[in-house]
Amino acid sequence: MKLKSRHLLGLDGMSKEEIALILDTAVSFREILDRPIKKVPPLQGKTVVNLFFESSTRTRISFELAERRLSADVVSFSTAASSVSKGETLKDTARNIEAMKIDMVVIRHPAAGSAHFLSRVVDANVINAGDGGHEHPTQGLLDMYTIWQKFGSLDGLRVCMVGDITHSRVARSNIYGLTTMGAEVSVCGPNTLIPREIEKLGVKVFHRLEDVIPRVDVLNVLRIQLERQKSGLFPSLREYHRFFGVTKEKVAKAPKPITIMHPGPINRDVELSADLADSEHSVILQQVTNGVAIRMAVLYLLGTSN
Ligand code: CP
């Protein structure tokens, strides 16, 4: 079986079989990460360019590691050190890079739709590493992989995304992916941070953590984007923490232990208490490790299917 598209632009519209193919493929790459020699040859002779127009720690390093472990030639680009700072457009930047005969492009960009746009103007395979508030598909996949690794199945599992759902590409990719895989997905946050009519995506909405905690297996806690506070979407970080901060005390009221996830970077003691982030219930660092395996799987499936 192959992925239907030459690109990975989002999880919206991806079939259950395609998601399962990526997760299954990642299993063997995850095993390679525990070997003393972590390099395998499938992308030998291919060149991958990482175009990062926005800051990133995990996604950028993870893609670079994944590419190098698949033996690709890797070029990484950041806005500050490029001609974008002289006003060059995304289209011109991408077409000039492609003229140097590259095979795949990984893009992170603050504009929603930038990865789709890029896929229409270049011949290379395009992978979306986060486009504005739209999607972050490899994050959604690595989150699903981490849950699947822990519970053995996604079907019927109860997962709640907590926090700023409106501005979160991570939430959107998780919602598309998890609902396709049969999980029971909910969101929880203040009214101002939950999009209207989100129920149409097949999720339940909660506005009180106390109502969610008794009925979930997993809490995926999202970063509060600190700049949102200035736009008056919630009164203060202290108040946010009081009502929506996920803490050891709050989750201790659950009938059974809840698995804690966070895509990073964490605002410790704002959306998630530091002790819970570092506790045995947290799989946050497993998410990061699994991210390399998922990105290897995606690069492998796209890069070897031409
Ligand atoms: N999870 C995530 O996208 O983190 P970075 O912004 O550090 O890449």
Image (cartoon, rainbow, N blue to C red):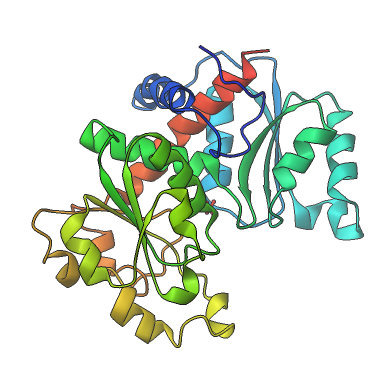
Q: In the image, is 85 to the left or to the right of 66? A: right
Residue at image location 24% in from the left, 63% down from the top: 212
The answer to whether 6 is drawn above or below residue 290 in the figure is above
Locate residue 272: give its quadrant.
bottom left
Relative to 197, residue 74 above or below: above
Picture quadrant where residue 231 is located: bottom right
In terms of depth relative to the viewer, which is nearer, 125 or 183?
A: 183
Residue in the foreground of this view, choosing between 286 and 80:
286
Residue at 83% in and 39% down: 94
Left or right, 110 with reference to 65: right
Left-right relation of 69 to 157: right
x%, y% of residue 108?
66, 48
Give coordinates of residue 254: x percent, y percent: 12, 61
Query: On the picture, is 238 further left or further right than 59?
Result: left
Residue occupying the point 64% across, 56% down: 132
Name the one closer to the observer, 170 or 109.
170
> Residue 301 placed where, x, y %?
56, 19
304 shown above or below 299? above
Q: Is residue 264 visible?
A: no
Q: Is residue 288 visible?
A: yes
Quarter occupied by residue 267: bottom left
Q: Quadrant of the C terminus?
A: top right
Outermost residue to the bottom: 235
Whole-percent x and y of residue 88? 90, 52
